[in-house]
Amino acid sequence: MKTRQLFFAPLIAALALLTACGGDDSSSTGNDDANTKAYLQVVNGVGVDFGSDDAAIEAGKKACSQLESGSSMLDVTNDMKTEAGNTASAAAVVGAAISSLCPDQKDKLVPSMPSMPSIEMPSMSDLPSLPTN
């Protein structure tokens, strides 16, 4: 169940951010403000109380810093779960931080799947023929 929560919470956060960031603002400061507002909207929407917006933003920036240092989303989520209240809320906060505060870390939103070994399939000519009547 926890794995499912870790998988879906960031996706929900990303969708919420896409909805919240629907407007087009060409200025960098405007985009930063819109991204910060979208991040806070997700954090507040999942019911995480950091005490203040500034503390919530600092938690998001800390998550981004950990991700940029090479930590996985799972590791950052585990580090934040006490502060956020539970694993699902922490995953939503980290997902929102990735989507709005450090979009260069988006590849960490969904864990990579292990590669499957290649299988050589027989050609049609190698298959036995069916008898005809």
Image: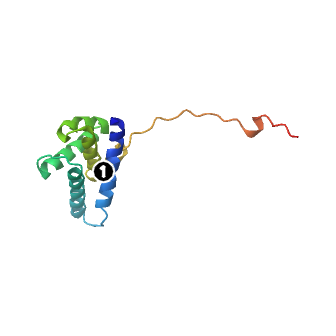
Q: Nearer the viewer, residue 59 or 15?
A: 15
Quarter where residue 2 is shown: top left
Which quadrant holds the C terminus? Answer: top right
Quarter where residue 36 is shown: bottom left
Residue in view at x 74 percent, y 39 percent:
124
* Image color mode: rainbow
Residue in view at x 49 percent, y 35 percent:
115
Q: Residue furthest right?
A: 133
Q: Residues within 10 Å of mark 1 (few under 14, many from 20)?
A: many
Q: Position of residue 80 (x, y in %)?
A: 21, 38
Q: What is the secondary structure assignment of the residue under circle 1? A: helix
Which quadrant holds the N terminus? Answer: top left
Amino acid bearing label 1 = Ala
Q: Residue furthest left?
A: 51
Residue in view at x 45 percent, y 38 percent:
113
**Label tally:** 1
Residue of label 1: 13
Q: Position of residue 17 (x, y in %)?
A: 30, 56
Residue in view at x 81 percent, y 37 percent:
130
Q: Position of residue 15 (x, y in %)?
A: 34, 54
Q: Is residue 22 visible?
A: yes
- Can you say whether 131 is above or below 21 in the image? above
Q: Is residue 103 visible?
A: no
Q: Nearer the viewer, residue 82 or 99?
A: 82
Quarter where residue 83 is shown: top left
